[in-house]
Image (tube, coloured by chain):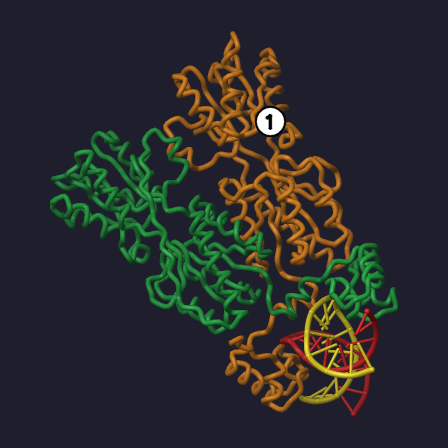
Chain colours: A orange, B green, C red, D yellow
DNA sequence: CTGTTAGCGCCTTCAT
DNA sequence: ATGAAGGCGCTAACAG
């Protein structure tokens, strides 16, 4: 079988002209006579000729492919980000290669390796929750493959990134709770590697301080994001003599688990205990007891901006211009449900 | 800038041997002397040599890339399918290119075109809801790019596909409702292009017939999957003098909208009206009023099986064997919540 | 065992 | 206005 697709060579032979003439004609090179050009195009059409992109990629040392590495497509946050990425990439004739780390640094390394082999032109990445060192990303520099991080960005200096500043919204979120009369407010944080910058926590402190509420470190608990761990964390909070009446939670998925569990324990949501969280995922629309408010982190925009930044880097590469490290920071927004 | 990566040529020059010897040594070709092989490998390591895959792809006419076309990554069904696809593809050294049609045939065509240009080795596709003709897929044959459809498969003969048979579960679902004492059961179907085979509807009929319940065609309504359309469809059902007490719904997303709307209208779920649907998406776990049961369609398995089938096709291509059209059908399963 | 040669499909000087 | 030739990086058939 093995159909052979037509090549410029074949066109050239049939027309008894040279390959380079065909190539030029196809590209509307000015120095080609009208009649030959037409003849070439006609023949190309007849044969259903299409340029072999892999050959062109090979020659141009460019694949028009960008690799996206993220923890998990099943999280709405990341699938929305993909939409933002595609929105910029596709019109620019780039195509998107996706790899999921499933929050495991080993997978992340493998994916990066594979993408390198496939000679992607650039990489967008949101790091896994146990990624604490970045050699594998660092290494891309020596291959001249630019990397732009988004959302989950490493807390090291020399990288490009797009992320969402959560500080102000965190202050706002806690103030929102305070405004509702809450005096004892807990904070359930995620894995230490993720919130390195700890804007959430800083905002939490700031709001308490601003309203002269005491800080009780024992009201700060952690979850590794698993349901089990979240339940344990909530148990811890509820075991205090002075139980919190509200909790600021790392993200909506965790909040859903927490709310689910609280209800199992017969707590009345928004009476006995209230939750505010991050991500603003859309399913909460169908819930009877969603977090009362959630911080929107604009995944679509983050994806789009990160892709734009990556394209700037790719340009500067071809223009041999220097390009300083850029860290785009978007504003988050508290959405009250 | 423009770093030049080391090539076998460079290794050859430094060692003053021929390019092909280097190539062979690197591939552990038996006919290469131990000392030269070692020398070559050592030099390769020193220079940080890595084969240029794009060159290899080009030569082998193979990209080790498969394209996946699906409506929307944000639907859990499809992101789960991707996981099944990756589970088979990655270990086989294939990488996955993703394109979303957003349920629009025009996008579908563009994506297909782009993937063709990128010379993907094969394609997995779940068609958009307004894809009624398949020339663009058909055309792939002339480029020798095999296509395997999954889940949303076209209802035409000569294609490869993996899908889930919904007939039996549909019967079961309706019988489940009948068992709960429901006598008037509605059916809310999706866009005509999607359920062409209409296994859901056939199952619906069959169950009614089996239990000697009358068929009332006016209890069968349609939604285009949008919230608005779903609400209108539900209104239609509720406008009957003999209102249904239960409804079989096209999928969970539609069901969520329907339930949401029913509750707005002060209907008590599972008292005044019950819902059973398809897909079994995981968020229902957090809902107070989920559909009482949902038909699991095993997206992960569908993705995995489709990928396996695609690989068989790719093999048979290189072996020049004939391969008959294959239509794998998985069993669905009614999950009671 | 190793080297030479040709070629994958296309583009691009350099000639003519 | 057109052709010839070389090369991108790698593989493989053909010679020794």
Q: Does A337 sit above or below residue B314?
A: above
Percent from the top left, x then y, of residue B235? 22, 41
Q: Left of A141 or right of it: where is A120?
A: left
Q: Does C8 sit above or below residue B112?
A: below
Q: Secondary structure at mark 1?
A: helix
Percent from the top left, x then y, of residue B276? 28, 39
- Please tell me which residue is depicted at 37% across the width and 47% down the height of the picture: B297
**Residue A309 seen from this side:** no
Percent from the top left, x then y, of residue A133? 71, 37
Q: Quadrant of the C terminus of chain A?
A: top left
- Please tell me which residue is depicted at 45% across the width and 20% down the height of the picture: A274
A177, B136: nearer the viewer: B136
B139, A286: nearer the viewer: B139
Q: Left of C9 or right of it: where is A238?
A: left
Residue B127: image quadrant is: bottom left
- Please tell me which residue is depicted at 52% across the width and 7% down the height of the picture: A241
Mark 1 crowdedness (10 Å alpha carbons): few <14, some 14-19, many ≥20: many
Q: Which residue was labeled with disc 1?
A: A200
**Residue A255 seen from this side:** yes
The answer for which chain carries disc 1 is A
């Amino acid at each position: 079988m093995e159909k052979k697709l037509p090549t410029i060579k074949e066109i050239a032979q049939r027309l008894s002209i040279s390959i380079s003439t065909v190539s030029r004609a196809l590209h509307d090179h000015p120095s080609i006579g009208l009649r030959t050009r037409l003849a070439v195009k006609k023949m190309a059409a007849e044969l259903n000729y299409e340029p072999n992109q892999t050959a062109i990629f090979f020659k141009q040392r460019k694949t028009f492919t960008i690799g996206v590495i993220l923890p998990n497509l099943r999280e709405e946050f990341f699938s929305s980000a993909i939409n933002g990425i595609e929105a910029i990439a596709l019109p620019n004739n780039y195509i998107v290669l996706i790899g999921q780390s499933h929050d495991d640094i080993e997978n992340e390394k493998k994916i990066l390796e594979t993408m390198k082999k496939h000679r992607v032109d650039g990489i967008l990445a949101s790091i896994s929750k146990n990624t604490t060192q970045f050699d594998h990303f660092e290494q891309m520099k020596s291959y001249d493959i630019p990397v732009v991080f988004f959302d989950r960005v490493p807390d090291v200096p020399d990288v490009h990134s797009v992320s969402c500043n959560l500080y102000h919204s965190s202050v706002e979120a806690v103030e929102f709770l305070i405004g509702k009369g809450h005096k004892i407010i807990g904070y359930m944080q995620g894995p230490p590697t993720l919130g390195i910058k700890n804007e959430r926590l800083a905002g939490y402190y700031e709001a308490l301080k601003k309203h002269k509420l005491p800080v009780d470190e024992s009201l700060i608990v952690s979850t590794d994001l698993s349901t089990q761990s979240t339940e344990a964390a909530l148990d811890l909070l509820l075991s205090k003599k002075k139980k919190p009446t509200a909790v600021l939670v790392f993200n909506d998925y965790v909040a859903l688990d927490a709310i689910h569990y609280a209800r199992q324990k017969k707590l009345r949501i928004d009476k006995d205990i209230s939750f505010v969280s991050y991500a603003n995922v859309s399913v909460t629309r169908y819930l009877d007891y969603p977090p009362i408010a959630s911080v929107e982190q604009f995944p679509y925009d983050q994806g789009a901006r990160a892709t734009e930044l990556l394209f700037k880097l790719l340009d500067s590469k071809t223009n041999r211009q220097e390009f300083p490290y850029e860290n785009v920071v978007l504003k988050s927004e508290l959405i009250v449900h």
